Image: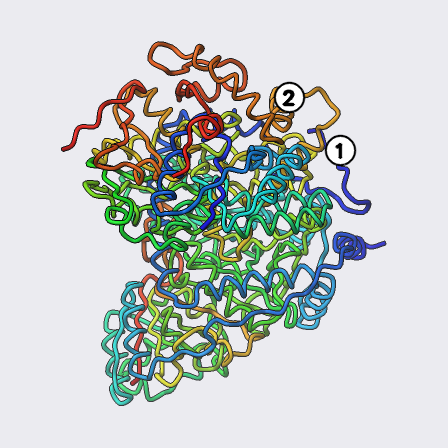
Amino acid sequence: MKIALFATCIVDAMYPRAAQATVAVLERLGHEVVFPQGQACCGQMHVNSGYLKEALPVVANHVRAFESEDYDVAVAPSGSCVASVKHQHPMVARHAGDAALEERADAVGKKTYELSELLVDVLGVTNPAAQLGSYFPHTVTYHPSCHGMRLLTLGDRQAGLLRGVKGLELVDLPEADQCCGFGGTFSVKNADVSSAMLADKTANIRSTGASVCAGGDYSCLMHIGGGLSRQADTIGTLHLAEILASTETEPVAVPGPAGRTVKVVAK
Amino acid sequence: MSTREQILAAVRTALKDAPAVPDIPRKYRLDGEADAQQRIDVLVDRLEDYKAGVTVVDEDAVPATIRDLLAGAGSYVVPAGLDPAWLAWETDTSRIRYDGGAHGARSVTELDATDAVVTASAVTVAESGTIILDGSPDQGRRAISLIPDHHVCVVRSRDVTAILPEALRRLDGTKPLTMISGPSATSDIELERVEGVHGPRRLDVVIIR
Amino acid sequence: MSRTPIGMPGLRPGIGNLFAEEKFPSAARRELGNSQLRKNLKHATSTIRAKRLAVTGELPDWEELREAGSALKTSVMARLPELLEAFEANVTARGGTVHWARDADEANAIIHGLVTAQGVDEVVKVKSMATQEIGMNEYLEERGISAFETDLAELIVQLGHDKPSHILVPAIHKNRTEVRDIFLQEMPGVDPGLTDEPRRLAMAARAHLRAKFLTAKVAVSGANFGIADSGTLGVVESEGNGRMCLTLPETLITVMGIEKLLPTFSDLEVFLQLLPRSSTGERMNPYTSLWTGVTEGDGPSNFHVILLDNGRTNALADEMGRSALHCIRCSACINVCPVYERAGGHAYGSTYPGPIGAILSPLMTGIEAEENGSLPYASSLCGACYDACPVKINIPDILVHLRGKDVDAHRGGLPSELDVGLKAASWALSGGRRLAAVEKLLPLGRAAAGRDKKIKKLPGLAAGWTQSRDIPAPPAQSFRDWWAKEHKRP
């Protein structure tokens, strides 16, 4: 299968390893990955902040970029950006009165999958240890990001994949379905409420005793990780893709205290 | 232009895009599947959950059951149309205060000084444990089942439906209706449910098989 | 208050208790400092969430009921003029009197006139959002008429000289000990040995209000439903104070928003399942009263209903936002909202707090009303409210829509830091080459980070981020760069 990768702006610029891991996982399954060069961002930050006019060129760019390449499906390592592509892009076009763009955005959206959705529903990954050689000998807790959980109804897909990783012990996160408080510009416009939400999230993560908090969205993980780091916590954050890509011969480094990476030591 | 006209005009202005009137998808359950015994079982479970007293009896045991439930009541009000057989046991008729019909209406003060009330009921929903009174002569006006602190309510099994839609179809919506699901309660303090506030603090339901 | 509504001619924005007195972020900051409040809200909302999930989960057709509820409300809004006229005709035919009020002032004046016509100086009240919204108690108080709240939580708020902070449990911000203290201080004749056991507190309220119920001549209520094709009204409650008010006084005045209509009596089969399960998390609330006009020998002989606009037509005119009027005031969205749980209801300023309030208040008053401009931003857009809403109001989408209206309303003025930032970002993010060019600056970010590879303090708007979170040093190479230079096809 030919799969177009939508890296998403935050991963492209800040967390390239999540996109690299996505590529590694897909190629390990024998698929061809392409990277449409024109891509940049889904525009969600603009839409969610009320800047629909400014979101329009961002949306139009994404649609153009993912129309210009020939592929079977597109994938992004982010539930939030995929939800934006599927639901917000046609809305932004409609708001601008551009029916043609709406139709094109809709077509791109229909071909776009969140990573776990693609792996489980389309590529039939049921046993990451066997199918991908996934190995990660650590205690992990998992934060299900809101948009993946509610807008894409990912259900157990991400956690199910984590459970199938060799050596990984998944511990339940209390109040897992509670938002971490990121919410894009919400985190700066309502910084106090956002920080209070984050404090509860990090306290819950800490209570699990896990050494890593995994998730499917680096926006939320940047927020959670930023909080844990500020609280001088030793718990690291990792994207689902990075854990799936981790193998016994090429283990992923676990982000450790003070943002430094530490060598993986098997339990 | 009157206020009425101005508001209606404003509504029409607001709707100038002529939004479509959708069809209503009534794919929810319109009829329940429970048989007669299951309906009673569910009803009992729900009423007990609400902390109501429940007794399931044969028709001929109704009078004795009511007698026992009223044992501690110095007086009780009954609607004029209540089945007299249900009170045939009463030897001290001074305890009975009839309301309605030829007896006229009792004052609120009188009702407040009455310990209990006995009524029949119109329809009951098993799934939610909801007894509905519609003001028929065997149920009386709304005040009598409200002011006394103890309500003994008789439910006939033929009047018990499995779910709400069936029950509403059996009612005349223009009658004064009271739906009762357990004794009065409040969750206003820390969302903790406490039974018994302004309405009857004790509800005893007598279900006739 | 600055109100320069731009809306359509003929539409009036709502007035009354719908306006925030300060912007949400600063109000929220103050409320966040109240640790007792945080504790009370956390306890109450987590209790109710669990209950709601249990009773909604046990119905096999919950989603179908939501679908029907949503469609019914959409239908009501589309047919509102004819339904209002039918409702009015049916109430009138059954011996009731219908009044129309364009805003809070008109509604209050009608109520005042009806009360004084009975020659009384006090009324008993059933908990009602509409009367809270129009500030009826204060209006009557100023004119020498006492309105006694009879719902336990409203009584707590009234005795405590406080404001409601939740639409279902207005005193949710108070715990049992605080309630006990209010009763001890403010309730005449209360037992000085009163404990903080909820049961004892409820009994104190019963004793306090009993005489009022039995002697009141006039009651004021709201309505949960008005049935257009019969003129029937419905009030859903728990304590029996509603039944007392709706049954015992000679005169009953019901204030109902024009959006509360349902087409037919049988439509209650949907809403009487959706409402209690979403609201208190019960299979059914203890008492529901339904009455139609005046019934000889049973209940009030003098019945009035006031149909209230107060900005509802303003909300109705917003095609994207009008579904906010579908709200049945269950409070499920409030109980699941992480922002409400931290900030509490008072931070929203309006009678309607939480996610629904964050859309309803600005829709009713107009987003141009500056006080309410910050409300649509009071959400992380986590979507929990939409999931919980029994009539499927897409609150997150309406929040985003209102943010858009707010941004557009401020275009042309002095650009804010966010305006400038997002405009620049719009340019940078509308092309792969542009983003690649910006990514060439990543090393600057690495230089800005300390030896521990963290950015800990940023200026301006971004300071909001670094108040509680670090930013990791950017990577040496973007993904795009890695792909071009290092990725080898397998």
Q: Nearer the viewer, residue B99 or A203?
A: A203
Packing grade of label 2 (10 A; few <14, some 14-19, many >=20) is few
Q: Secondary structure at mark 2?
A: helix
Numbered circles on residues, count: 2
The three-letter amino acid code for the residue at tag 2 is: Val
Could you tell me which quadrant the C terminus of chain C lies in?
Answer: top left
Q: Nearer the viewer, residue B201 or C33?
A: C33
Q: Nearer the viewer, residue A145 or A174?
A: A145
Q: Position of residue C145 (x, y in %)?
A: 60, 44
Q: Is residue C74 visible?
A: yes
Q: Is residue C138 visible?
A: no
Q: Is residue A107 left or right of residue B165?
A: right
Residue sitting at x 41%, y 28% = A223
Q: Quadrant of residue C471?
A: top left
Q: Nearer the viewer, residue A17 or B83?
A: A17
Q: Is residue B162 above or below residue C183?
A: below
Q: On residue C371, which mark appears?
A: none
Q: Quadrant of residue C62?
A: bottom left
Q: Position of residue C1 (x, y in %)?
A: 68, 29
Q: Position of residue B127 (x, y in %)?
A: 37, 71
Residue sitting at x 56%, y 55% = C221
Disc 2: which residue: C420
Q: Nearer the viewer, mark 1 or mark 2?
A: 2
The three-letter amino acid code for the residue at tag 1 is: Thr
Packing grade of label 1 (10 A; few <14, some 14-19, many >=20) is few
Q: Secondary structure at mark 1?
A: loop
Q: Residue furthest left?
A: A267
Q: Is residue B158 above or below residue C490?
A: below
Q: Position of residue B90 (x, y in %)?
A: 28, 83
Gap in Å between the C-alphas at discs 1 and 2? 26 Å
Disc 1: which residue: C4
Residue sitting at x 42%, y 66% = B146
